[in-house]
Each structure stands twice: as structure tokens, then as C-alpha cells.
Image (cartoon, grey):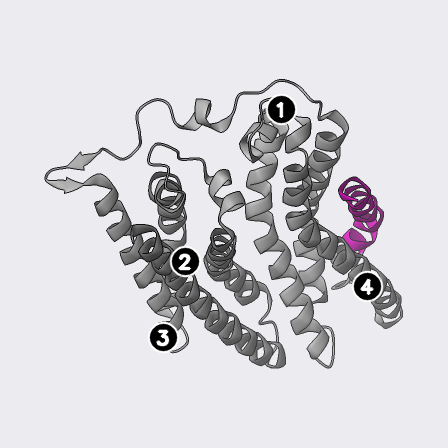
Amino acid sequence: MNLLLSIAALVLTLIVLDTALRIFRRWKKSDEEERYELEKDFYLTFSAVVIVLGIRLFLVPLYFWTMQSLIPAIPGAMCLWGVFNALPELTWPALLLKFLLPAMYIGWLLLAQINSECKTNPLMRNLMALFLLLSPLLIIDSAVDILIFFRMNPVEVSCCSNAIDVGPRPIPMWIGTVSGQTLLILVFFALSTIFTASLILALRWRIFEQISLMLTLPLAGTLVIAITEILTPWLLHLPFHHCPFCLLFQNLSSLIFTSLFWFALATPWIILITKKLGRKTDEARGIELRLRNTTLTYSGIAMIIAMTIILVDLSIAMT
């Protein structure tokens, strides 16, 4: 299914590219008759792009589920780490794409929602422009998935312990008189709390939009290190094991809080897309502001739930 859907998304993207480019180039210069024809083409292109982006978003969880199911077929693989190392030149870049591109896809879909709620089509040209910018990434995203499932072979790989548990750790055991893990978890919760507050305060003061955007990258990096250096060994009761895929596979709540963190971290970037491209008219601006506030509210709630889950998990693990 993953392979077939990836092929379908790739084909649809290539089919509508020419029409999207024509709408973008001709819309401002066209007369009334040509605009009518372009608008008809827009609805077909719009529907095709919604299908493509819907497929790509659906394929994110399906991709991980499919790769997880390949573990028994890869000699030496104990988790997704081993499966990814069976074809590392494609699977690791694909993993990065699976985390970054969905935020852009959701941004386009929210712009489409704004445009659909308007009486006219004020964002038609902006939608086509963003799709044209996204199309190379869409093509790469689909092509990488296709190549992975065509080229994946049951080669011998080393398990995650041989890769991630050896060598020096990124966090020293002691920093002064304070445990490195203790200091890291305090920094992680401090950043998470500030980020959550900035999402909520952005509902009233726009300056906090910029603050939350600036915090996304350091918090994302801190989250990754916290998962490998603290959450995995503590929650799995394996003090010398640091594989995040083992945590996600063996601890269901980790899937939940990781997904919630992803949504919250993606929110400032999604809002940036809708803010820059979704306020072309007063009507569109009002709709965009409503969607912005709704997204910020949900992301703030997501952060609170995610941090609560982590605190509960850590409390249980320490008892």
C-alpha cells in the first residue's frame, strides 16, 4: 500500500504541475473570459493537490508501521534502527523528510481551508505558488519512498546497541557537582514550559509568535537528546541503552507525547505560512486569525498533555 500510494502521489503531482504553473503565471494578466477558464482548471488542480497532500500525510504513520513490520525480515535488526541501516542512504533522509514536510503540507491545507471559506477565491494564486514551491519536495518525498521499497533487501545489520550505546555520550555524567542527566531534564522542562507559555500568550500578544518560533529548534534538539539520554534508559529501566526507536516500540505513551510535541513544534511554522500567504483580503484575514487562534490553543493543550505524560511516566519509572 505504501508503494502504491507513493506512486499515485508522484503521478498526480507531475500531472497537475503544468496547470498550476499556468494558473500562477496567467491569473493577474488574464481577462474575464480567461479567468473563468483558469478558475475551472483551479478547482480540478485544487482537488488533485488536496488528494496528494492527504496521501503524503496518511503515509507518515503508514511508513513507520510498514518499516516496523520489516524487522523480522532484516537479520540482526531488533528495532527500526536496524531496518533503517539496511538502506541508510535513503531511509535516514526519508526519516528527516517525514518530520519536516508534513508541517508544510498542513500549512497548504489550512490555506486551502481559508480560501474555501471565502466567498471568492482570494488565495488562488498563493495556493498555486506554494504548491509549485512544494512540488520538488513532494516529488523527492514520494520518489524516496518508492526507491526504499524497491531496493530494501534482507541484508545483515548490526543492532541499535552496537551503534548508539557505544562511544562517549553527548551529556557528561557530571557537570560540576550536578548530574548531567538531572541538568538536562531540568533544561528540557524549562524550555518546554517557556514554549508552552509562549503559545498561549501568542493568543493575545503577537510578539510571542516570534518567541515560540525561535524556541522550536532548540526545543526540538533538546527533546531528541532528552529522549536518548534520559527517557529511553529511565523508562525502559535499561541505564546503558539509548535507542529512541526501542522506547517508541516498547512504551506506547512515548508515541503519544512525541506526536504531541511534533504538533506543537510544527504550529509556529504552520502559522507563519498562513500568516504570510493567507491574509490577502479582509475576509481571508478574519478566517486566518480564527484558524490561527484555534491552532495555537490546540498546540498549547498538546504541550501540557505531553509534559504531563512524561512526568507521570518518569514518576512511575522511579517508584
Give the mark nearer the N terminus: 4 vs 3: 4
Q: Identify residue for label 3.
A: 205
Estimate the x, y position of residue 150 in percent, counting from the top left: 77, 29
Q: Is residue 12 covered in magenta?
A: yes
Residues marked 4 and 1 touching at CB (< 8 Å): no
State how far apart marks 4 and 1 are (Cα): 42 Å
Q: Amino acid at mark 3?
A: Trp
For image coordinates 49% across by 71% down, the residue present is 298
Q: Is residue 299 above or below residue 159?
A: below
Q: Identify residue for label 4.
A: 42
Q: Quadrant of the N terminus?
A: top right
Q: Amino acid at mark 2?
A: Leu
- Classify 10 Å Cα crowding around label 2: few (below 14), some (14-19), many (20 and above): some
Q: Amino acid at mark 4?
A: Phe
Q: Magenta span: helix, strand or loop, mainly? A: helix
Q: Identify residue for label 2.
A: 213
Please identify, in this view, whether the residue under mark 4 or under mark 1 is nearer the observer.
Answer: 1
Is disc 4 placed on a helix, strand or loop? helix
Please identify, in this view, whether the residue under mark 3 or under mark 1 is nearer the observer.
Answer: 1
Relative depth, front residue between 211 and 226: 226
State how far apart marks 3 and 2 are (Cα): 14 Å
Estimate the x, y position of residue 45 in percent, counting from the top left: 81, 59
Give the mark nearer the N terminus: 3 vs 1: 1
Is disc 1 placed on a helix, strand or loop? loop
- In the image: residue 176, left or right of residue 22: left
Residues marked 3 and 2 touching at CB (< 8 Å): no
Q: Identify residue for label 1.
A: 86
State how far apart marks 3 and 1 are (Cα): 48 Å
